[in-house]
Image: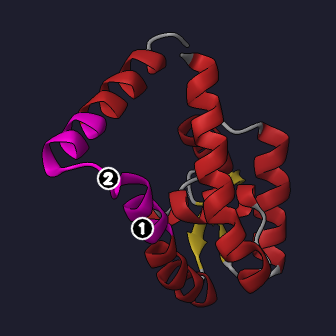
Amino acid sequence: MPFRLSVLSNRVSSAVARLYEDRFDLKLPEWRIMAIVGRNPNLTASQIVDISRMDKVAVSRAVKRLVEMGRLTATSDPDDARRQRLNLSEAGWEIYAQIVPLALGVEERLLADMDEAERAVVDRVITRLTEAAAKLD
């Protein structure tokens, strides 16, 4: 099952990545960070690593590039000046608003052959697997 979940994740991520890579000049880690920050503003890079389970170096590089591109803002954390709080910039929000519908379109195509009951089961199973996987750490 872990292998199958990995393959599924990679296929879905690749499908979404094809939609935004050329159009928005975003790599997969960059979009993941934008998606996380869009849903959870004011995070630190360490918090993004914890949420995403992405490699610390990959997050650092992607954050740096997003800040350089003007898609993320980084401000000093008032409690610890060594940390930076990350938020989508105005340009970042504009891109986010365009990509989310594209990603939801991929989701709709992925679930198109399922009825509402099956979709609800998939949602519950993914939630339970995510919770169980968190306990493995």
Residue 60 in the image: state x and y as whole percent. 81, 51
- Disc 2 target residue: 113
Was residue 110 drawn as part of the magenta stretch in this picture?
yes
Work out whether residue 81 can be spotted.
yes
Residue beneath the point at 60% across and 66% down: 34
Q: Nearer the viewer, residue 81 or 102?
A: 102
Q: Secondary structure at mark 2?
A: loop
- Mark 2 or mark 1: which comes first in sequence? 1
Residue range of the region highlighted in magenta in the rendering: 103-123
Q: Is residue 98 left or right of residue 81?
A: left
Above or below residue 3? Residue 77 is below
Residue 120 in the image: state x and y as whole percent. 19, 42
Residue beneath the point at 55% across and 13% down: 137
The alpha-carbon separation of the residues under discs 2 and 1 comes to 15 Å
- Disc 1 target residue: 104
Residue beneath the point at 36% across and 32% down: 126
Residue 100 in the image: state x and y as whole percent. 47, 73
Q: Which image quadrant is residue 21 in?
A: bottom right
Q: Is residue 61 left or right of residue 126?
A: right
